[in-house]
Amino acid sequence: MRVVVLAAGYSTTVQDCGRFGFRKFGVPAAGALDAAALRVLNLLVGNDECAAGIEISSGRIRLQFADDRLIAWSGGDFDVHAGAVAVPQLRCARMSAGAVCEISPRHGRAWLVISGGVDVRPVLGSRSTDVRARFGGWQGRALRDGDELLLGAPTKATARITSAMNGAVADWSGPQLSSSRAERGGVEGSRGESLQVAPRDPSTPLGMTLRITPGKNWNDEAGGQLLRGNFHVAVNSDRMGPRLEGANIDTAQTSELVSEAVVPGTIQLPPGGAPIVLLADCQTIGGYPKIAHVITVDLARAAQLQPMDEVRFELTTLEHAQQLLRQREHDIALFRAGLQARFG
Amino acid sequence: MQRDPLSTSRLRPGSFVCVEISTLGDSALLIDFADESSDPGMLLQRALSAADALERSKLPGVVEITSAYQSVAIFVDETNPEVSDLTEHLLTLLTSHEKPRAEQRAIMDIPVCYEGEFALDAARIASETKLPFTKIIELHCSIEFKVAGIGFTPGFPYLAGLPEKLRVPRLPTPRTKVPAGSVGIANAQAGIYPFESPGGWNIIGRTPLRLFDPTTTPPALLTPGDRVRFRQITRAEFDVARANEI
């Protein structure tokens, strides 16, 4: 069965956990910018953990369902309604045949999953959209008004979850993975910790701290400037990676290098001195100095960045970064086991 | 995984391994062979051989291996408990300096039309090199290039081997749209744009070949280590070949 995209918003794409094993052919990882969030959402509605969902960043989205489905979403500051019912983050909600799900973004990015998953044809092992090379996802492009997406068959887990729900929205919720929360209203809060604040004025830029480990071309001068700088996201920023302005870094001690591998999280320093934080759609090889790397768990925060948002960096150790990553996997595994125990 | 947080140089006494292993974020390592030689050709061969040896050794927790010019990247699943001894495994492997497989790959023939509307920067390349464009074409077709890595876009080959005489700086202002199939040169590098994309390299001609097709295995026409030679074709030949590709 299908879901009809009545209104597609802007840069709305089909994404799963990403495309791996083809870096040597220059193929970016792609995938949900916060793949851990997508995985939790898929578990919530009874899907395979890496089923394809929809990544949303701006513009109003309206989706009409052809049959009964469960949905769940999480991410930035969004309003999501299933018919007339407001759907909080990380709760699954029923959509009945003909019902419309309406999503109004205020800030950041969000991921929406549907039971059964979006059933586009996998390309190179993934259903993610590669918008630059125009393959994967739905016709290799962002969704447009009027597109109709096929959905997969719901699993037995979905059926059991559905029958356990009393109302339109489940009374249990998925875990909020600690690193996916971003601070609001400037970067004055305790660094590295998230602040829970009442709904914010959408005109206030989001402020966040991203934790980094030093890169191959780190030097104390440029690294110090990176750590002291107050940056904001430049206008022309996309899923390849936000360019940061506001505190140009002295590039005198760095120069263009022999091209080598870069990864999502790499902070590149082009000659102009405005750093770029690479995200999931980034190229596989780069020649700019790699001054630092945003730790993997904080890429979930970086995924929430939009133009004018404020960014600062904080140094951490590799051991801590890896420990946080293992902790996140542990949290997801616990949630998976809990669902398994409850719904089989 | 036990690794130094900053770039690490390891020099082992009694061996001729002198590599820099650095972290590429918290889930990948980069091995740079630059200190082993000043010859880019030897370094490229070293990186290709090392990537091949690493690929075959199937180290626990390693999910992907890539190489580019003089370095190899190793992507690691940090949640796999077996990754703890990875650096030691790597050093052992690199110290053993296993003989590269005697693999002489066939030369890939890439047809290129160097005519007017395709050679977007013919005049600039001629003036920078102080060579007539016919001589430039002759030179470009006389070299055996080697694929040093694939990146920038899916299927974009970075080709090593451009002679000194053909070295031209990047365009002062990059183009917002370089047509698919454009064959470019910039400083010591040569490459081919598989897709229409922005780009700052000097465009010398265009190939009718499709460099990347996600529905084929492998998806890219070229693989790191491949040998490449360009061959001049006419506009008519280009059109025929292009029609066959589509």
Image (spheres, coloured by chain):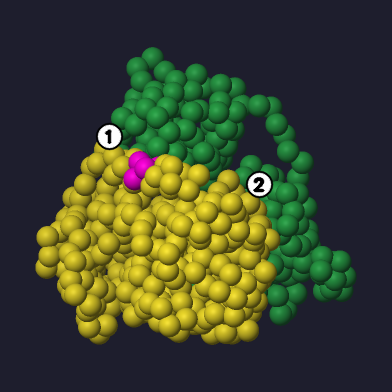
Chain colours: A yellow, B green
Q: Look at 49% across and 28% down and name the residue there.
A: B60
- Amino acid type of the residue that numbered disc 2 sits on in the rendered structure: Thr
Q: Chain ID for label 2?
A: B
Q: Are marks 1 and 2 on the same chain?
A: yes
Residue behind mark 2: B223
Location of residue A86 in the rendering, given as x and y in whole percent from the top left corner: 38, 77
Classify 10 Å Cα crowding around label 2: few (below 14), some (14-19), many (20 and above). many
In the rendered structure, does residue A332 fall within the stretch colored magenta?
A: yes
In the image: residue A219, left or right of residue B177: left
Location of residue B1 in the rendering, given as x and y in whole percent from the top left corner: 34, 31
Location of residue B125 in the rendering, given as x and y in whole percent from the top left corner: 59, 70
Which quadrant would the N terminus of chain A be assigned to in this image?
Answer: bottom right
Magenta-tinted stretch: A330-334
Residue A147, quarter of picture: bottom right
Q: Residue A223, labelled with which disc?
A: none
Residue behind mark 1: B4
Q: Chain ID for label 1?
A: B
Residue projecting furthest to the top: B14
In this rendering, does residue B8 appear at all? yes
Classify 10 Å Cα crowding around label 1: few (below 14), some (14-19), many (20 and above). some
